[in-house]
Image: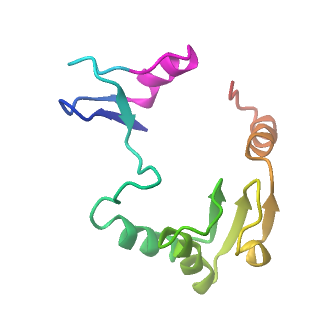
Amino acid sequence: MTHSCGQCGKGQTFAEVAPVVRRRELPRCLGCGRVLKPDITFFGEMLPPGALEDAFELAGSVDLLLVLGSSLVVQPAASVPLATLANGGRLAIVNMGVTPLDGHASGRWDDLDAEFRDLARHFSIAID
């Protein structure tokens, strides 16, 4: 929901950045002009301290965990859904390819875009 500048640290919200991205432009820092980065961890980046422990704790406390667009093969994050299963929760997986946990999922779909468009229609939400 937030984006930050790696140079000066100033941030912007998703609501501020989304219109820029929809115009197919790079969101830039209002302070120094550098490109903003979403406040997420990309593949190959180090996780913030405590993030993995928090993820396992939260996953172990939910009734349903949505696994969206993950092959569930990159460790240690791929093991997070196991905490949900171990505590009696269920998995819903949406991923283009098979995952090692497909057989444990209560629901399994291939097309993230199609599924979210169906959900949006069901709940009368505009997603374009």
| Residue at left offset 73%, top offset 56% | 94
Q: Give the residue at the far bottom of this rendering.
A: 86
Q: Eyeballing the image, is 105 above or below 44?
A: below
- Reply yes or no: does residue 115 show up in magenta: no
Q: Give the residue at the far front of this rendering.
A: 44
Looking at the picture, how far across and down is residue 82, in whole percent? 58, 79
Q: Give the residue at the far left of this rendering.
A: 8
Q: Count how many numbered circles sit on residues in the image.
A: 0
Relative side of 92 to 40, left or right: right
What predominant SS class does the magenta segment belong to?
helix
Of 1 and 68, the residue lying toward us: 68
Residue 1 figure quarter: top left
| Residue at left offset 23%, top offset 29% | 10
| Residue at left offset 37%, top offset 42% | 39
Relative side of 105 to 87, left or right: right
Q: How is the image coloured?
A: rainbow
Q: Eyeballing the image, is 101 above or below 34?
A: below
Q: Give the residue at the far top of this rendering.
A: 23
Relative side of 79 to 17, left or right: right
Looking at the picture, how far across and down is residue 111, in whole percent? 79, 47
Residue 93 figure quarter: bottom right
**Quarter in which the C terminus is drawn:** top right
Residue range (magenta): 13-27
Looking at the picture, how far across and down is residue 33, in whole percent? 27, 17
Residue 7 figure quarter: top left
- Reply yes or no: does residue 24 show up in magenta: yes
Looking at the picture, how far across and down is residue 53, in whole percent? 37, 73
